[in-house]
Structure formats: structure tokens, C-alpha cells
Image (tube, rainbow, N blue to C red):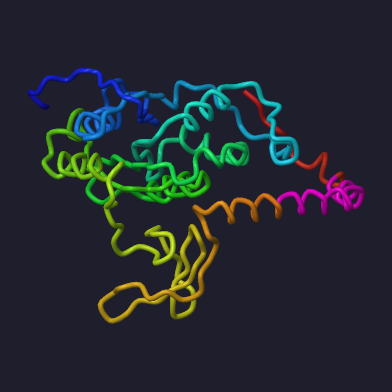
Amino acid sequence: MTDRQISPRGGRKVILGLIASQRRLGNCELFAKEVSIRCPVEHELQLIRLPSLDIKSCLGCYRCLAEGTCPLNDDLAFLQEKIAAADALIVAAPVYFLGAHASLKAVLDRGFSFYRILENTHRKPTILASTYGISERMGVAPQMMRAFASFLCLDVRADVRLEAALPGEVLTKEKNASAALRASQALFGEKRIPSRGGCPFCHNDIWRRKGNGFVCTLCHGTFSLDGRGTPKPGKAGWGVGKPEFVTAHREWLKGMKDKFLTRRKDALRLTLQYKDVGEWLEP
């Protein structure tokens, strides 16, 4: 814990903390607040607890792509409004069963709806923070955080992984406290905290073996490793994190919907054969 006086900060900038944890004063919340306290730029810290929001499952209707609206009546519009209005984000999520908390994935699954506010999210300074318990057992959580940032075209200033199993360990461990300080300086500063050893294109550090090389599981760029284990770029993949990628993805989806509409009768004839196969169970 810190012994300095903690008081709300005023100022024109707004940092929005997206906390993907139900725990009050849990490690994710504490880390976001510690970054805010140490941030040298005057600002107001606002917080949203993602598990407390009503975020419904995507219907896959594509109305958000065609019309820019969603038929679901939930809290997503509120979340989008606050993200768009903020000057910077801190996204913090605990690792649950080797993945980021499901509340973050629920938001990411509605990612198409965020395309309409892309002009407000592009290059927004962002800190990503994953908290985990057992040493190095963070699973795919950092990739999910990177995916969230990429599809909103956020500017990731730091991507930190924090070993903090017990309450408050995100503050009491020297390494975590140092990460909070460096992240606070990078958020609005000129220098970001560099990612090391990840994909040479998007910095994701989960890869899949392909032939004699590797393919990134986020941008799908290819690369190899030199004798010292340093990634050597091959063929670039998706330009994740760039508006051009989002635009191309949106147009591809629209094209696939148009293709479906031309083949709808054939698809219906095929699928109806399976209508009565199996028994659906309900509680």
C-alpha cells in the first residue's frame, strides 16, 4: 500500500478504466487506480466494471454493419459512449482458466458494433493488464486483450502481465509496482513499453507452427526465428489495429451476407434435413 495522500484529480483529460472483474478493490481495480495516481498528466479517472453490465450475446444479424444499429437492448451503447469519450483506456482483466475474464470476451463478441465509433477509438492510448496467480500461467489471456485492442484500433502503450494471486499483491510486489509506474509514464508519454519476443507485425506472443516457420494466431503473419530466437518477418498478415483492416473486414462480411442471400433457398433445403436430429435439453 502507498502512504501518500490519495485524492481525486481534476483536469480536462479522462482515463477510463475497464475492469473485467467482480472483485471490489481487487487487483485489476487497484492496478488501474495505481496507474492513475502515478500518471503525471492531470486527469479524471472513470471506471466501469464490465461484469456488472448487461451485455447480451451477438445475434449475428449484421444489422450493425448494414445500418449502424443493433436490435439488442442492453448496456453496450453506454459502454461505447464512454469509451469514445475517454482520452485513454486502462483495460484490466484477471486470468480465469487460462483466458481473460468472460466479461471482456462478451464485449469483444459484439465487436462489429464498435466499427461505427472507430474514428473515436483509433489511436486512443491504452494500457492492457492481465493479472494471474501461478507463475507464467497466463494462458491465452494476453492474446484476447490484444484482440480487443486491435479490433478497436487502440494504441497499446503497454501490455503488462502481473503475477498477483492474493488481494493487494498487484501493489505489494515490487515488480508489479514498477510496472504500474512505467505504464503510467507511457500512457500519455512519447515512449511506449516495448513488447519483446512477440510477432514482428502485431506483437502477439502466441504462435502456431507452420512448416519450418510460425504463423501468428492474431494477425496471421508468418515469420521464422534466427539463431538467437529473434523473430524474422516473413509475409505480413492482417493489418490488425489499423482502420484499413476494419474496413476490409466489414466489406468482406457484407459480401458474405450478400452471397448467403443469393444461396438462401439452397442452404434452407440442406439444413432442414437436420431439423429433427437429436434432442435439445433444457433446465
Q: Is residue 38 magenta?
A: no
Looking at the rendering, in which quadrant would you find the C terminus? top right
> Is the residue 242 above or below the residue 94 in the image?
below
- In percent of the image, x 72 and y 40: which residue is there? 62
Q: Residue furthest front?
A: 12
Q: Position of residue 95 (x, y in %)?
A: 35, 40
Q: Residue at x 53, y 40 (%)?
A: 108
State left or right for residue 273 relative to residue 74: right
Q: Quadrant of residue 57?
A: top right
Closer-to-camera residue (11/169): 11
Instruction: Indicate the quadrant where residue 110 lies.
Output: top right
- The answer to if 264 sits in the magenta stretch is yes
Give the quarter of the figure containing the N terminus: top left
Measured as percent of width and height from the top left, residue 207 is found at 42, 64
Q: Residue at x 38, y 76 (%)?
A: 232
Q: Is residue 245 left or right of residue 37?
A: right
Q: Foreground: 35 or 74?
A: 35
Q: Quadrant of residue 98?
A: top left
Q: Which residues are magenta?
A: 253-271
As drawn, 240 above or below 183: below
Locate residue 41, reporting x and y percent. 25, 34
